[in-house]
Amino acid sequence: MSQTIRQRIIAELRQREMDLYQIAQLLGMTEKETLTHLPHVQKSVTAQGGRLLVRPARCDGCGYEFTSRQRLAPPGRCPKCKQSRISGPWYAVKLRGQPER
């Protein structure tokens, strides 16, 4: 039986940390399509006793880190320097009993 898109995302994020672009490329989807699956992935992982880990996005211009951001989507621009050169955020899945990265 083949895996659903969300099951594939979970399986990949259990193996390594990825950003939205990498996940989209792996699945052959757009970043916008991929982003619609992340809240559901988060709920599924939580129901399994795990967590969707999100390493904050960072501005490539000034180094500002979006540590207080709660949304899963990447920010559009930096509030500090107003540039839109943003890296991340990066996602990973940690299930119960799996070591932290």
Image (spheres, helix red, strand yellow):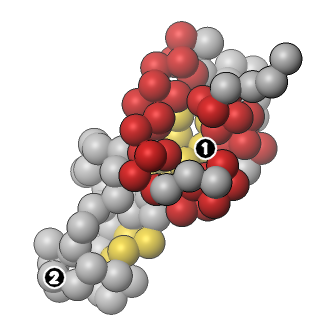
Q: Secondary structure at mark 2?
A: loop
Q: Amino acid at mark 1?
A: Ala
Q: What residue appears at the point 14 percent right and 72 percent down from the top-left corner?
A: 79
Asked whether residue 30 appears in the rendered view, the answer is yes
Left/right of residue 11 with respect to residue 25 in the rendered view: right
Q: What residue appears at the point 46 percent right and 64 percent down from the top-left corner?
A: 88
- The image position of residue 64, as x and y in percent, is 30, 74
Q: What residue appears at the point 60 percent right and 30 percent down from the top-left corner?
A: 6
Query: Where 69 falls versus 53 (above or below)?
Result: below
Q: Mark 1: give few (<14), some (14-19) or many (20+) Cα within 10 Å.
A: many
Query: Where 100 falls versus 43 (above or below)?
Result: below
Label of residue 82 in the image: 2
Left/right of residue 98 with respect to residue 35 in the rendered view: right
Q: Earlier in the sequence, mark 1 or mark 2?
A: 2
Q: What residue appears at the point 47 percent right and 35 percent down from the top-left corner?
A: 37
Asked whether residue 51 appears in the rendered view, the answer is no
Is 53 or 42 nearer to us in this picture? 42
- The image position of residue 40, as x and y in percent, is 45, 25
Q: Amino acid at mark 2?
A: Lys
Quadrant location of residue 21?
bottom right
Query: Where 101 falls versus 20 (above or below)?
Result: above
Q: CA distance from mark 1 to mark 2?
A: 28 Å
Q: Mark 2: give few (<14), some (14-19) or many (20+) Cα within 10 Å.
A: few
- The image position of residue 38, as x and y in percent, is 46, 36
Q: Residue furthest bottom?
A: 61
Left/right of residue 55 with respect to residue 49 in the rendered view: left
Is 35 or 14 nearer to us in this picture? 35
**Residue where numbered disc 1 is placed:** 92
Query: Where 79 falls versus 75 (above or below)?
Result: below
